[in-house]
Structure formats: structure tokens, C-alpha cells
Image (cartoon, grey):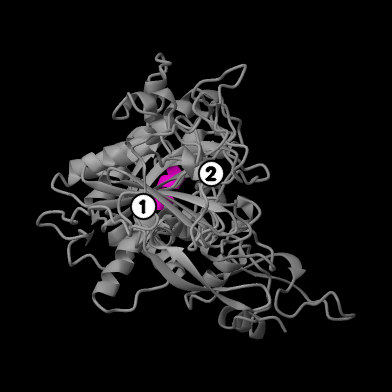
């Protein structure tokens, strides 16, 4: 899965090699923005943590070399092919009788239909049931004060929950300092949409009681406790792969869901903008950015369940993700995977080759098995050094600095490109084909990252699973838009922009839902709705107060009081019978 400056910086790993790879500002990250008193800390403490440690157990990622980096191992099997024009044997791409791209019915046209492919009615019904059960159990165990807002709690129904999701998505399109601001009544910050759908109290009730799954309180096993969100993400993962088949080029990268709470599987990488967080590995289609499959990192539980336990973890992750693709498309062959130097290694290239999949990726020169002569070689006139071993080719290219690649697909050919230097000077350069194809195809996950960075619901939370829930919701919206956009282009139709798509989705989710209020609202928006409805308004007498139409205390002699008031309108405003009554109930700007 340039960003808005109000969001967090990009949490996806990016190659540090200077390849003119497009960099998008932000990522699929749930930020820890403060809500000024309306944070997610209201739940029980056991909801906030998976396992609480006195001393934090953190997986520290020192660099992108990870497990199998080490001293270079010279190997006589490597052959210098810098001048030979070598080209590896390529496996023809095939997925049997299926076609790449969206796998959806032709009658799915509207944004809400695409979104409900992932956020299905079945999934929402489960969330509503868990939310209502959790609310009942929490409220039954508390002694509520006389004025507590929780006295008004009632079970969430389906229409109300879809409207809740719609409001959440709309908040992502217009980030404010805190959640209360969406219900502000001040003239300089009032947004009519939010109070027209929910009262602030009801929205926050649902937000605080939102629940996915209640684990067995007597079982502290980590595998049991992560089920709070793992079942939800596994369900979304199955839907992601059901409705799309990626093209030949795919890429593997990771997302960081920013979090700094106490969980046993938190990761820390001091060289990344988002240093603390929960890792989610993703495989995406390089052309569209569609997130095909995901792998959340739950520490040792994840590592133990990966394929090929005899290999390093950084090799097993891409293999595991690709195996999930093969499970869905057993006849697939000839795929071309792109990885950055965190994953790329000779064992990964060899294992993918056995699965009829090609690999291209940047690689650290000190990875095990890389030819040691590459460190001492004199570069050719093309500033390249190429060596091969079997079907694996190692390429080093010297530009501003040396960039190393491993590939089982690309040849030793070069392509002529132009580069614009500072001052507008244009120079011609020659780049290896491997680098140009990597630059074009490695940005698949970054493309999803770009979509997410634009309109993402960001809220601080001590409950790690909430972060994961909203991350999953955002990815569902992104994949929905990519499906919609791809289908529109296939039909030679102009698609909506991302913002218009999200706004239309919000309207369709909220639909005609409006919360029933127990008392008349005094907000100016609700007041105008009643005031100008053209229906019968009943007048009564009471204490004298200023007429809302003709009284002006700012001017001497312009204060006018009356005892008549409208008993139908919110706030029971005072006004004179006759002209003042008529202006108030017929004109938007009624003030004299």
C-alpha cells in the first residue's frame, strides 16, 4: 500500500540507492496525533496491551542487511560477463486460462460496491455484534454517575455502523486538530456534515466501544490475544487476493503502522523516519499499486509459520508471500519480483527460480555469496561490472556511487537517458536495463502509499489493534479505488479522482442515515433546517428577551425586547409577531 505535510513521513522501506525512484511523502501509517482529551485510552487496560513487560522486548533492525549479511564469500563459479552481452534464460509469463487485473462482476460500478467487496456485510455484522457485546459487558461492570453520557448508550445497528465508517473516512479528507473540532459550533470552523449525521456524544460512544474480537480473559497466550485483529486482517487478505490477479511484475515491501505502546512484537529501526511500529509485509502489483497480499509481523509467531525454516527470515518473507500467490494461482509461472536490499539475496533468487519466478533487486555488496572481486574491480567504459553464476547475474554500476543489483531476468544491455542537472543543464547518461526496470517497477507499494498518505484517518491510540483496524480499512479503500480506476480505464472511461471517489463513497455509506435526537439541537445548522421548513410554527409567551431579528445591543436605542417566542424552533427564540416572525421563518439572513 508529495504527501500532505500534516501526516507522518513514509514508513515503507525504500532503496537508498540513487535510482531516481519516485518518493511519496507518507505511508500507510496510523499517526499518534493527540486528540486533546478524546483519545482511545478510555477502555480497560488489558485492551491496550498484548503483553506488558517491565523491560521492553524490541526487535531492533540495525540496517537493511539483516540476517544473511556478512563477509563476502569469493566463489570461483562466478564468471565475468561484463563485455559478453549476457542474457539469462527467461521463463514465459503465464497464469493459465485466467486474465490479470480485476476479477469482479461487470455490474459492480459504484464506489460502495467496490468497498463492500472487502468490507463485506458479513464482516460488518461480526464487528457490530462484538461491539455491542463488549459495550454491555463494560457498562454492566461500572457504576455510572447520574450525568454519565453512557446512560444513553444503545446497541449499534447496521445502518448506523456504515454511517460511522463513512464519517471516519470523511474525517481523513479534512484532518483537524482533534476530534471535537468536527462538531465545533464556531463560525470559523463549523462543518455542517458531521453534526447532521451524529451527535458528538454518540459518535464517540461508538468510537470508544468499537471492538473486533474478545479473547479469552483467562488465556494469556500471545497467539490467542492477537486474534483480536489477526482474524480481521486474514479476512481482508483473503478478499484482496480474491478480486485481483497481479500482472507479471510484482514487488515486496513493508508498511510500518506507527505505534510506541507496550507490545512484544514492536519493531525499532533507528535509520527510518518511522522508528517505532508494527511491521506489515505486503506484495503489490507493480503497475497499479494494488495490495495483493499482506503478512503482519507478530514476532516469533510469524517467523515460526513462514515457509523454509532453514533460510534467513528476510528470504522466507518474500517466499511466503509468493507461495500465497501460488496457492491462489497454482499454474502461475514467469512472475518477476522486485525487492530492495533488505530482502535481496542469492538464496532468494535461487529459491524463486525453482518456483519459476524471476527476481531483480538492489543488494548489499557484503551479502554472502557475492563475488569478492566486485569490490576490487576496475569498471568498464560503461561504468559497469557484471558477473554471473548459473542463472543469477550480479551487476554493479557506478554513478555518483556504486549501486549493486542481483537479477535473474535482465541482461547486460544499456539504455540512453537524459538527466537534468542543477542549473538546467542536460546531460546524456547510459544506465543498465536492470536499473531502469527496477526504477519503473519497485514503486508498486509506494503507489498505494501515496494514496494512503492523502486521505488517511489518523488518531492517537494506546490500543494497538485499533491502529491495525484503521490501517486495514484504509487499504480496503485504496484497493477499492484501484479496482474502480483500472476497470474504468479498461473501458476507455474517465475515472473519478481519488478525492471524488472517497467523497462519493462517504455519501453512499452514510446514505440517508441521520441520528434521532432526544431533544432539539441548538446548533445553527439544525436550527436553520427547522426554521425554514415551511411548516406550522407555534408561538407562545414567556419572559421578555431580545428579539433575534430586530434587536441590536451594539447600537444605541436599537435594543428591542419581546415576550413572544417560537415554541417549535430549537432554542425557543424571541421575536415579534408580524414582520420579525415572517423574516425569521422565510429568510436565511433574517437579521435586520
* 486 over 552 or under it: above or below: above
Kindly indicate the quadrant of the structure image that contains residue 3: bottom right
Measuring 33% from the left and 64% from the top, which residue is drawn there?
111
Q: Which residues are magenta?
A: 469-475
Asked if disc 1 and disc 2 are in contact, CB closer than 8 Å, the reply is: no
Q: Farthest right residue?
A: 556
Whole-number angstrom distance, CA of label 1 to CA of label 2: 16 Å
Q: The C terminus appears in which quarter of the rendering?
A: bottom right
Q: From this viewpoint, is residue 209 visible?
A: no
Disc 1 element: loop
Residue 305 image position (x, y, % from top left): 32, 26
As drawn, the label of residue 590 is none
As drawn, the label of residue 81 is 1
Which one is nearer the viewer's eye here, 213 or 566? Answer: 213
* 429 over 60 or under it: above or below: below
Residue 222 image position (x, y, % from top left): 42, 20
Q: Is residue 304 magenta?
A: no
Q: Farthest left residue?
A: 97
Position of 336 with respect to 68 (left or right) is left
Which one is nearer the viewer's eye here, 432 or 298? Answer: 432
Kindly indicate the quadrant of the structure image that contains residue 236: top left
**Which numbered disc, 1 or 2, marks the residue that appears first in the sequence?**
1
* 124 over 105 or under it: above or below: above
Disc 2 element: loop
As drawn, the label of residue 376 is 2
Q: Main secondary structure of the magenta part?
A: helix
Which one is nearer the viewer's eye here, 518 or 191? Answer: 191
Q: From this viewpoint, is residue 361 visible?
A: yes
Residue 537 image position (x, y, % from top left): 53, 72
Which one is nearer the viewer's eye here, 553 or 38? Answer: 38
Kindly indicate the quadrant of the structure image that contains residue 184: bottom right
Amino acid at each position: 500500500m508529495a504527501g500532505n505535510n500534516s501526516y507522518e513521513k513514509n514508513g515503507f522501506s525504500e532503496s537508498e540507492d540513487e535510482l531516481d525512484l519516485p518518493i511519496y511523502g507518507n505511508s500507510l501509517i496510523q499517526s499518534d496525533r493527540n486528540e486533546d482529551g478524546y483519545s482511545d485510552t478510555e477502555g480497560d487496560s488489558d485492551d491496550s496491551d498484548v503483553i506488558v513487560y517491565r523491560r521492553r522486548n524490541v526487535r531492533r533492525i540495525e540496517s537493511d542487511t539483516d540476517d544473511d549479511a556478512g563477509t563476502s564469500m569469493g566463489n570461483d563459479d562466478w564468471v565475468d560477463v561484463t563485455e559478453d552481452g549476457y542474457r539469462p534464460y527467461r521463463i514465459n509469463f503465464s497464469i493459465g486460462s485466467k486474465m490479470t487485473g480485476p476479477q469482479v462482476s461487470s455490474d459492480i460500478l459504484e464506489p460502495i460496491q467496490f468497498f463492500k467487496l472487502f468490507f463485506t456485510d458479513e464482516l460488518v455484522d461480526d464487528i457490530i455484534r462484538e461491539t455491542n457485546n463488549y459495550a454491555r459487558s463494560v457498562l454492566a461492570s461500572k457504576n455510572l454517575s447520574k450525568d454519565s453520557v453512557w446512560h444513553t448508550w444503545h446497541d449499534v445497528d447496521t445502518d448506523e455502523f456504515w454511517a460511522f465508517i463513512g464519517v471516519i473516512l470523511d474525517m481523513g479528507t479534512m484532518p483537524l486538530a482533534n476530534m471535537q473540532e468536527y462538531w465545533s459550533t464556531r463560525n470559523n470552523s463549523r462543518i455542517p456534515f458531521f453534526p447532521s449525521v451524529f451527535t458528538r456524544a454518540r459518535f464517540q460512544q461508538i468510537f470508544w466501544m468499537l471492538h473486533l474480537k474478545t479473547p479469552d480473559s483467562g488465556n494469556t497466550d500471545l497467539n490467542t490475544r492477537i486474534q483480536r485483529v489477526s482474524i480481521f486482517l486474514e479476512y481482508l487478505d483473503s478478499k484482496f487476493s480474491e478480486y485481483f490477479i497481479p500482472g507479471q511484475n510484482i514487488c515486496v515491501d513493508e508498511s510500518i503502522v506507527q505505534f510506541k505502546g507496550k507490545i512484544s512484537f514492536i519493531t525499532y529501526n533507528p535509520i527510518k523516519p518511522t522508528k517505532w511500529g508494527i511491521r506489515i509485509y505486503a506484495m503489490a502489483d507493480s503497475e497499479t499499486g494494488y495490495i495483493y497480499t499482506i503478512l503482519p509481523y507478530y514476532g516469533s509467531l510469524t517467523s515460526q509459520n513462514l515457509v523454509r525454516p532453514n533460510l534467513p527470515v528476510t528470504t522466507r518473507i518474500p517466499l511466503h508471500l509468493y507461495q500465497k500467490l501460488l496457492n491462489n494461482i497454482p499454474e502461475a509461472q514467469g512472475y518477476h519480483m522486485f525487492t530492495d536490499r533488505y530482502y535481496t539475496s542469492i538464496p532468494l533468487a535461487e529459491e524463486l527460480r525453482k518456483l519459476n519466478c524471476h527476481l531483480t533487486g538492489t543488494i548489499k555488496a557484503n551479502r554472502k555469496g557475492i563475488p569478492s572481486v566486485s569490490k576490487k574491480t576496475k569498471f568498464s567504459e560503461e561504468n559497469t561490472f557484471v558477473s554471473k553464476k548459473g542463472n543469477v547475474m550480479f551487476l554493479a554500476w557506478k554513478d555518483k556511487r556504486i549501486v549493486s543489483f542481483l537479477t535473474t531476468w535482465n541482461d547486460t544491455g544499456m539504455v540512453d537517458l537524459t538527466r537534468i542537472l542543477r542549473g538546467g543543464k542536460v546531460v546524456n547518461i547510459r544506465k543498465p536495463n536492470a536499473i531502469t526496470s527496477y526504477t519503473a517497477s519497485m514503486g508498486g507499494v509506494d503507489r498505494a502509499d501515496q494514496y494512503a498518505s492523502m486521505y488517511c484517518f489518523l488518531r492517537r491510540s494506546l490500543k494497538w489493534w485499533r491502529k491495525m483496524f484503521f490501517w486495514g480499512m484504509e487499504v480496503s479503500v485504496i484497493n477499492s479505488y484501484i479496482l474502480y480506476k483500472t476497470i474504468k480505464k479498461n473501458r476507455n472511461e474517465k475515472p473519478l479522482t481519488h478525492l471524488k471517489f472517497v467523497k462519493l463513497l462517504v455519501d453512499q455509506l452514510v446514505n440517508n442515515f441521520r441520528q434521532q435526537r432526544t431533544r432539539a439541537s441548538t446548533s445553527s445548522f439544525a436550527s436553520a433546517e427547522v426554521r425554514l421548513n415551511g411548516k406550522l410554527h407555534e408561538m407562545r409567551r414567556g419572559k421578555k428577551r431580545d428579539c433575534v431579528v430586530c434587536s441590536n445591543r451594539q447600537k444605541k436605542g436599537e435594543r428591542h425586547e419581546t415576550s413572544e417566542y417560537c415554541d417549535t424552533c430549537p432554542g425557543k427564540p424571541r421575536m415579534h409577531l408580524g414582520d420579525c416572525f415572517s423574516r425569521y421563518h422565510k429568510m436565511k439572513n433574517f437579521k435586520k
